[in-house]
Image: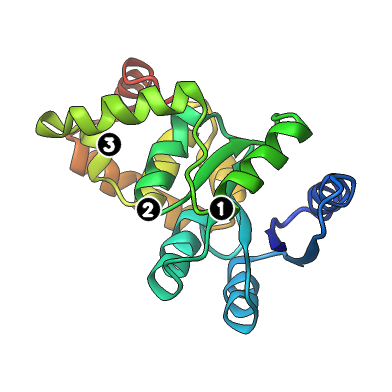
Amino acid sequence: MNILIVDDHAIVRQGLRQILMESGEAIFIKEADCGSDAIRQIREGEWNVVVLDISLPDRSGIEVLKQVKKEYPKVPVLMLSMHEESLYAIRALKAGASGYITKQSAPAELMAAIRQVARGRKYLTATLAEAMADSFGADYEQPLHEALSDREYQTLCLIASGKSLTDTAEEMCLSVKTVSVYRARLLEKMKLRNNAELTHYAIKNRLV
């Protein structure tokens, strides 16, 4: 299998590479540390699986995923994130991801997910499958946060988890001014007045 690992942390990439090399599979591995590099390498090569992090320094993993699926719809993308499934998994799957697992997953689960998506199938945990079913079944009363852009949604989750604007900007690799704009937009779209109401909404809807 030809596998592209996309993550901005060298230690994470090295750990993933080691897990893959110890799996016993015949695997060719390349790495990218940002979204633009990932897009370039995907265009230049042929890939059985792209393992893609949600948080990248130049753009969000969801944005990279959407571009990959637009240009190469048949390339399987497995999202790998430090964030729990409840935060980004459904959004990622609706954007075209073949699966979503967290960085807390065991090596055996990572390999099972890679083998599954490489065969052209979806990889869903039982919890995620149930959440997906609930999500698609409730489209007639879509929750307000579903209308947010990926960046606005990420801002919502980070602020609701207790992070300041400065901390949020640092994690998203954006300026505080840009994050403030996203915050203002999401408050307007969701008809919320302040961070307290934002946090209450996030807790009520199990986003944090």
Q: Position of residue 43 (x, y in %)?
A: 57, 81
Amino acid type, callout 3: His
Amino acid type, callout 2: Ala
- Tell me how the rendering is colored: rainbow
Instruction: Name the mark nearer the viewer: 1 or 2.
Output: 1
Disc 1: which residue: 119
Q: Which of the two residues, 173 or 95, is positioned nearer the viewer here?
A: 95
Q: Looking at the image, is mark 3 or mark 1 earlier in the sequence?
A: 1
Disc 3: which residue: 145
> Tag 2, which secondary structure?
loop
Amino acid type, callout 1: Arg
| Image quarter in which the N terminus is found | bottom right
Disc 2: which residue: 95
**Alpha-carbon neighbours of circle 3 within 10 Å: few (<14), some, or many (≥20)?**
some
The count of marks equals 3
Decide: is 132 above or below 26: above
Residue 8 figure quarter: bottom right
In this view, the residue farthest toward the bottom is: 44
Residue 136 figure quarter: top left
Q: How far apart are marks 3 and 1 (CA)?
A: 33 Å
